[in-house]
Image (cartoon, rainbow, N blue to C red):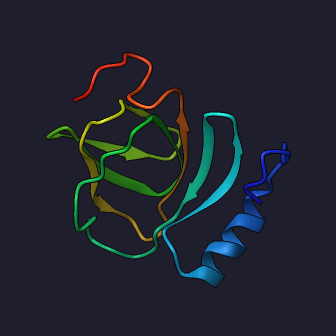
Amino acid sequence: MSDERDWHVAAEVLRTRLLAAGEGGVSAMTQGAMGLVLYAPGPTSADEHDDVHLQDELYLVTRGSSRFDRGGEEREMKAGDALFVPAGMRHRFAWRSEDFESWIIFYGPIGGESGEER
């Protein structure tokens, strides 16, 4: 389902794929420099390590709640919230509920739109 020609994706199909794969995220679609991922990691207390990605990221929380560490600053997140992480910034979920789910949009050039490394 990550074929660049895909222009529609059903969340229920992706949730089924997540359950079958037992992974934290599944690619929904890509188009050029944009990638869309459904992230639903299941029960856990925290990410084991910080992530750093090469592109800017936009998180759109659709279920549950979490505490997100973005560059050393923590914020509570819940369904309906959005969060931006610039390329190169360390980030992780310090905590998340069992039902947590978020769409993550990776976009823009390597190094982010600002072109600065963090």
Question: Looking at the rendering, which quadrant does residue 45 occupy?
Answer: bottom left
Report the quarter where the N terminus lies: bottom right
Q: Between residue 23 and residue 62, name the one nearer to us.
A: 23
Using residue 96 as the reference point, say whether residue 107 is left or right of it. right
Using residue 40 as the reference point, say whether residue 114 is left or right of it. left
Q: Residue at x 14, y 40 (%)?
A: 72
Q: Residue at x 80, y 52 (%)?
A: 9
Q: Between residue 91 and residue 66, name the one nearer to us.
A: 91
> Percent from the top left, x then y, of residue 76?
30, 44
Residue 59 lies, with reference to residue 115, above or below; the image says below
Residue extending farthest to the top is 114
Question: Looking at the rendering, which quadrant does residue 49 occupy?
Answer: bottom left
Residue 116 lies, with reference to residue 77, above or below; the image says above
> Percent from the top left, x then y, of residue 61?
51, 46
Q: Residue at x 46, y 69 (%)?
A: 41
Using residue 27 as the reference point, say whether residue 112 is left or right of it. left
Using residue 50 as the reference point, say whether residue 64 is left or right of it. right
Report the quarter where the C terminus lies: top left
